[in-house]
């Protein structure tokens, strides 16, 4: 989905607030919730793609104002409610106030039927796909052309895996793009590499 | 605007405690899992692990080559496991004329069992939005001013392949032991927002 989580290349953000030895956690509950979503994954309540997509399904205002671990918390609670493991009424009662969840799940999709395998050095183009459900193609590479530099083992296909649909595992191809082709006349000069699932790619024209 | 009948949103720590208690009540051993997860985050998944990998690669060329060929297998040689869904680790070697930096524009992905959990700024909106497009500017703002003729490669972690940067060994460390070398390797250097 073309959500606000898809931040790569968005403008108007200020400096990165960085310091050496920056903290991973700031409050005790953050450590606990970070561990707890892992417990839920290992218990088979949901998988990592469902987890990521439930974060993306947060209402935009909620997503943008939430800290990282509030997004973790919201995804975990949303999926536990959607899977029928706990009820929202129970959560509200225990929390002593409203408990905002992510917005409902939409349709997913399975692998691209015409997908092809590529070799290192091949020129590829990212398909001009607009996907309503979960997708791991950042918008900034849509339709762009690059060169394959690495090939990964096969992974579950996120567009299906986040929606409990069956699909074949497929590899990702690390594709090298020129920043100046991604954002002509409006980017620092660099090569930008993205791990692109096979279904998102076709041979370059 | 929320409808007037909506109660105030519960504070974060109370929402976190609520989901923990609700799962515990469903027979899921949340307490034990949390204790294990917090232990891993604080005592196991530390950047000192990645630093050991880097230091060994600096002194042992055969290991360096194995690391560059198959990162996951090479870190396993040092007893460092990766989660099952991290099926691939690509190690990106910096040189005198090449610099690598990693990010995750969609969320927060890192090789956290090797290089440590991602720092707050890595997961924040500004780094995610800007590093792919304003890469040199962002690095300069973060204290790393790369020469114009140095090639820069940015790696966006959009799948479950993980990346780590193998920093360039500083020239002044000739003759140092692996332990001494590991001491100078930082999480920032393995993300690629610093050079050593």
Image: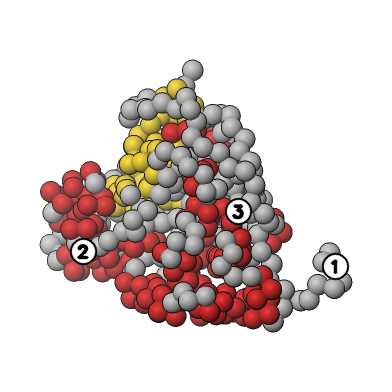
In this view, A78 is above or below B5: above
Structural crowding at the residue carrying mark 1, measured as other residues with C-alpha within 10 Å and reported as few (<14), some (14–19) or many (≥20) = few
Residue at mark 2: chain: B
- Of the 4 image quadrants, the one containing the C terminus of chain B is bottom left
Tell me, yes or no, whether dots 3 and 2 are on the same chain: no
Front label number (1 vs 2): 1
Indicate the quadrant where residue B183 lies. Answer: bottom left
Indicate the quadrant where residue A186 lies. Answer: top right
Structural crowding at the residue carrying mark 3, measured as other residues with C-alpha within 10 Å and reported as few (<14), some (14–19) or many (≥20) = many
Mark drawn on residue A56: 3
A162 vs B36, nearest the viewer = A162
Q: In the rendered image, which residue does mark 2 sit on?
A: B79
Tell me, yes or no, whether dots 1 and 3 are on the same chain: no
Residue at mark 3: chain: A
- First in sequence, mark 1 or 2: give its number: 1
Structural crowding at the residue carrying mark 2, measured as other residues with C-alpha within 10 Å and reported as few (<14), some (14–19) or many (≥20) = few
Label 1 to label 3: alpha-carbon separation: 24 Å
Which SS class for mark 1? loop
Residue A11, can we see it? Answer: no
> Where residue B155 appears, x then y in whole percent?
42, 45
Residue beneath the point at 34% across and 68% down: B45
Q: In the rendered image, which residue does mark 1 sit on?
A: B3
In this view, B83 is above or below B13: above
Residue beneath the point at 18% across and 69% down: B179
Which SS class for mark 3? helix
Which SS class for mark 2? loop
Q: Residue furthest top?
A: A205
Residue B49 left/right relative to A171: left
Label 1 to label 2: alpha-carbon separation: 54 Å
Q: Residue furthest right?
A: B4
């Amino acid at each position: 989905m073309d959500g606000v989580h898809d931040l790569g290349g968005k403008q108007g953000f200020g400096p990165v607030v960085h310091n050496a030895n920056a903290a991973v956690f700031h409050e005790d509950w953050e450590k606990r919730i970070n561990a707890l979503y892992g417990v839920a994954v290992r218990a088979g309540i949901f998988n990592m793609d469902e987890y990521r997509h439930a974060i993306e399904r947060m209402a935009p205002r909620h997503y943008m104002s939430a800290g990282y671990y509030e997004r973790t918390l919201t995804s975990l609670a949303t999926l536990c409610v959607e899977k029928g493991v706990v009820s929202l009424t129970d959560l509200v009662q225990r929390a002593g106030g409203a408990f905002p969840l992510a917005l409902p799940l939409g349709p997913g999709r399975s692998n691209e039927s015409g997908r092809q395998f590529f070799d290192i050095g091949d020129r590829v183009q990212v398909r001009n796909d607009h996907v309503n459900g979960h997708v791991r193609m950042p918008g900034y590479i849509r339709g762009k052309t690059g060169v394959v530099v690495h090939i990964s083992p096969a992974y579950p296909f996120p567009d299906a895996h986040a929606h409990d649909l069956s699909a074949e595992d497929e590899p990702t191809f690390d594709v090298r793009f020129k920043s100046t082709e991604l954002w002509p006349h409006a980017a620092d000069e660099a090569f930008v590499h993205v791990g692109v699932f096979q279904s998102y790619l076709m041979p370059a024209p | 605007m929320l409808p007037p009948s909506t109660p105030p949103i519960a504070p974060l720590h109370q929402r976190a405690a609520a989901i923990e208690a609700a799962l515990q009540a469903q027979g899921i051993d949340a307490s034990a899992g949390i204790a294990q997860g917090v232990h891993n985050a604080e005592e196991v998944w530390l950047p000192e692990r990645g630093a050991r990998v880097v230091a060994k690669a600096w002194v042992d060329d055969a290991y360096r080559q194995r690391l560059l060929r198959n990162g996951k297998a090479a870190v396993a040689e040092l007893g460092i496991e990766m989660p099952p869904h991290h099926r691939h680790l690509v190690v990106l070697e910096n040189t005198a004329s090449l610099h690598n930096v990693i990010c995750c524009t969609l969320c927060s992905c890192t090789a956290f069992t090797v290089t440590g959990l991602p720092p707050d700024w890595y997961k924040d909106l500004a780094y995610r939005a800007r590093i792919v497009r304003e890469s040199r500017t962002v690095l300069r703002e973060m204290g790393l001013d790369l020469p114009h003729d140095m090639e820069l490669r940015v790696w966006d972690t959009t799948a479950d392949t993980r990346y780590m940067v193998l920093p360039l060994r500083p020239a002044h460390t000739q003759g140092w032991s692996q332990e001494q070398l590991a001491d100078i390797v930082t999480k920032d250097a393995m993300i690629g927002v610093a050079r050593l």
